[in-house]
Image (tube, rainbow, N blue to C red):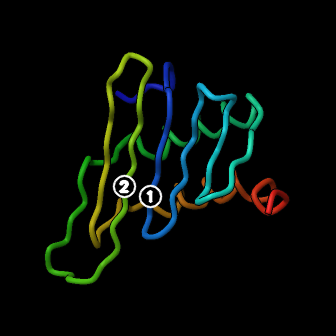
Amino acid sequence: MITVNNVKSIIFEDGYDKMSIDIGNKNTVTYNSTTITITNDELFNYLFLFFKIIEDWQTEYIDLTVIDGGIWKLSIDYLDGTKKKYLGRSKYPSNFHALENLNKKLIGDKYYESI
């Protein structure tokens, strides 16, 4: 069972892009080299949907038949020191695009206003 409580940070890497959410540091979101701050409501809504999306994910998605496919990683750090990691190489969960869309929605306007 995945829990929203006590999340310290989330890091999502997909190819050349990296997004991190540092909850302990005033709800900062860093996308590549740009950092923005989100409200507690935005954070809560994001985490609620985030955990709904990944609740049935396996920890690994790997297709060894593809030589030059994409690599992605997702890690969740909790305040108690535990970590949950997901990764993939040339293979993705069926709802992977839902996570990508959620991330884009979170950084969307605020990201583009800050650059």
Apparent side of residue 62 relative to residue 12 in the rendered image (left or right): left
Q: Secondary structure at mark 1?
A: strand
Of 86 and 28, the residue lying toward us: 28
Q: Give the residue at the far right of this rendering.
A: 113
Q: Secondary structure at mark 2?
A: strand
Residue located 58% across and 60% down the image = 32
Of 60 and 75, the residue lying toward us: 75
Apparent side of residue 63 relative to residue 86 in the rendered image (left or right): left
Expressed as whole percent of the image width and height from the top left, the position of residue 74 reads: 39, 49
Q: Which quadrant is home to the N terminus?
A: top left
Dot 2 amino acid type: Lys
Q: Earlier in the sequence, mark 1 or mark 2?
A: 1
Task: Sort mark 1 into few (<14), some (14-19) or many (20+) by Cα contacts within 10 Å.
Answer: some
Task: Sort mark 2 into few (<14), some (14-19) or many (20+) by Cα contacts within 10 Å.
Answer: some
Above or below, 80 relative to 87: above
Of 87 and 9, the residue lying toward us: 9
Estimate the spatial distance between the alpha carbons at disc 1 and disc 2, rounded to whole Å.
5 Å
Residue located 70% across and 56% down the image = 105
Expressed as whole percent of the image width and height from the top left, the position of residue 103 reads: 60, 54
Tag 1 near tag 2, CB within 8 Å: yes
Q: On the image, numbered disc 1 is attached to which residue?
A: 13
Expressed as whole percent of the image width and height from the top left, the position of residue 43 reads: 67, 34
Above or below, 23 relative to 93: above
Residue located 21% across and 65% down the image = 62
Residue 73's mark?
2
